Amino acid sequence: MTNPAERLVDLLDLEQIEVNIFRGRSPQESLQRVFGGQVAGQALVAAGRTTERDRPVHSLHAYFLRPGRPGVPIVYQVERVRDGRSFTTRRVVAVQQGRTIFNLTVSFHKPEPGFTHQLPMRRAVPGPEELPTIAEELRGHLGELPEALERMARRQPFDIRYADRLRWTPDEIEGAEPRSAVWMRAVGPLGDDPLVHTCALTYASDMTLLDAVRIPIEPLWGRRGFDMASLDHAMWFHRPFRADEWFLYDQESPIAIGGRGLARGGIYDREGRLLVSVVQEGLFRPRDSSVTEP
């Protein structure tokens, strides 16, 4: 497979090895740990495979407990907590080499009528067609990309375009607010299964959210002064969507203190309708710290 979007769909296609047990691949990457969005997306697939398909996901709450090892399969054990008339609840435990690395609780809701309101988007931003890709931003600043970055850009399953000016030096971040907005969409078609789009967006939701915490501290690109790790992650799904169409991820960090930073985001379609709400807390440790795990 040469299309990164096809590779993402394949990554989310778990092997069922028992009634409530699934196994997911973990690609061998040059990373210290498995990407958290991958584990969350795969766990959500496992939960969805045990649920009636007429009940889309409406919320999930997850904890990242240990870093996963790239290249080692992950087993997802699903507990069928409740099957009600309107709501279905599942609990998923992700296990790798005998150790629990991730917990997920997810709720599904059968669609029903109700009242509607929504606060407007916080601000207007340029459209994605007016903005450069990350690779173009990096080439404009660095010239020719290092081979590792070029390879990463080619394998990226999402096209990401920053709506705010990227800051490249410590001087540029002075006075910067902890806010960031990016346009995103899968780099290719993801098919028509709504669960695949939900799981793909869950994958993407972990890619840039903690940027909002870092913006007042250090430039987003270059050598990081902190080791970062997602601690927990929550999402609420409000409207149907396609992850292979442009969506705006508006992100902010209301507080960072005690080695932890909180970030929240709203995901909007091009008409400004709120699709998904996200909240995440991350761990930020100076790189000279001797502690490597949460």
Image (spheres, grey):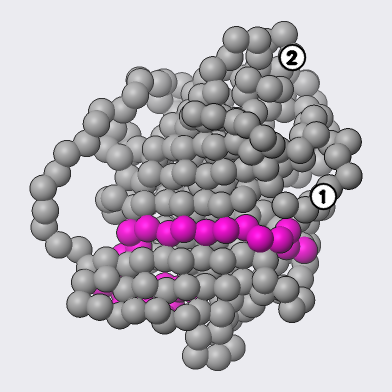
Residue drawn at 80 percent across, 34 percent down? 286
Residue drawn at 44 percent across, 37 percent down? 265
Looking at the rendered structure, the kind of residue marked 2 is Thr
Locate the N terminus by quadrant: bottom right
Residues at circles 2 and 1 in contact by the CB criterion of under 8 Å: no
Against 19, is 34 above or below? above
Residue 41 point in image, percent of width and height: 53, 61
Task: Report the side of 153 relative to 164 (left or right).
Answer: right
Against 120, is 209 above or below? below
Q: Is residue 54 magenta?
A: yes
Q: Quadrant of residue 97?
A: bottom right
Looking at the rendered structure, the kind of residue marked 1 is Thr
Residue 277 point in image, percent of width and height: 38, 44
User: Depth check: 246 or 97 in front?
Assistant: 97
User: Depth check: 256 or 189 in front?
Assistant: 256
Task: Report the side of 182 relative to 7 (left or right).
Answer: left
Instruction: Using the image, tell me which numbered label, if any, was put on residue 292.
Output: 1
User: Depth check: 79 or 155 in front?
Assistant: 79
Instruction: Using the image, tell me which numbered label, if any, was put on residue 229.
Output: none
Q: Which residue is mark 2?
A: 169
Residue drawn at 32 percent across, 67 percent down? 108
Read off the magenta span.
Answer: 46-69
Task: Report the side of 166 relative to 143 (left or right).
Answer: left
Against 31, is 208 above or below? above
Q: Is residue 286 magenta?
A: no
Residue drawn at 27 percent across, 71 percent down? 87
Q: Secondary structure at mark 2?
A: loop
